[in-house]
Image (spheres, rainbow, N blue to C red):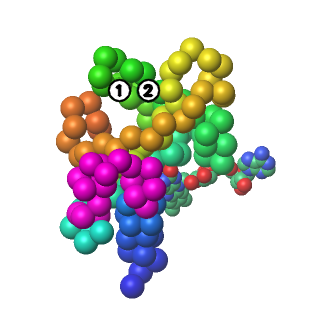
Amino acid sequence: MSLGIVASLGVSLGLTAATILSKGSLEQKKRWLPGLATFEKVGAWAITEPDSGSDAFGGMQTTVRRDGDEYVLNGRKTFITNGPFADTVVVYAKLDDGSPVRDRPVLTFVLDRGMPGFVQASRSRRWG
Ligand SMILES: Cc1cc2nc3c(=O)[nH]c(=O)nc-3n(C[C@H](O)[C@H](O)[C@H](O)COP(=O)(O)OP(=O)(O)OC[C@H]3O[C@@H](n4cnc5c(N)ncnc54)[C@H](O)[C@@H]3O)c2cc1C
């Protein structure tokens, strides 16, 4: 098996499903884990951004704010294994609570492929 396939399967199960398993509610686990555990669905796990790699949490620019009962996410991720074709994407974002950016809490969200406003680019233009 190629290392690329191993990385793809590993991220889908070991990072995406594992994060939902450890942080998700029962409802979220029931919704997303069966498909990921059987590899019927492809998962991705998105922390890295164009301007934050090693300092992922400190330099994170992606924000999230409350809007009534909903959250509005705004930002970009890069170098995301399975990113262009994943069905389920765990995304990390900083809560826009007015505190200094580096001190804001980091929250985790699960996005579904095809959600309004969610774009999964086919490849990084930086390398294209
Ligand atoms: C094949 C591949 C798959 C990936 N998949 C994912 C994924 O699925 N999800 C995801 O979120 N990310 C993913 N990434 C991104 C990966 O996590 C980042 O590349 C990594 O965090 C490093 O960030 P960077 O590339 O911006 O390097 P930088 O942070 O710019 O670091 C560049 C170099 O500088 C060094 N350096 C950085 N800061 C310091 C410091 N303070 N002191 C000394 N040295 C320092 C680093 O060790 C490194 O050698 C993937 C990357 C690759 C290559």
Q: Which mark is residue 64?
A: 2
Q: Which residues are magenta?
A: 18-36
Residue 88: say if magenta.
Answer: no
Q: Secondary structure at mark 1?
A: strand
In front of the other: 113 or 67:
67
Q: Secondary structure at mark 2?
A: strand
Q: How far apart are the alpha carbons under marks 1 and 2? A: 6 Å
Residue 21: say if magenta.
Answer: yes
Identify whether 37 is placed above or below 81.
below
Residue visible at 51% across and 45% down in the picture: 47
Residue visible at 23% across and 46% down in the picture: 113
Q: Quadrant of the N terminus?
A: bottom left
Residue visible at 35% across and 47% down in the picture: 25
Residue 98 seen in the current view: yes
- Identify the residue position indicated by label 1 in the image: 71
| Left or right side of 59 for 115 | left
Q: Which mark is residue 122?
A: none
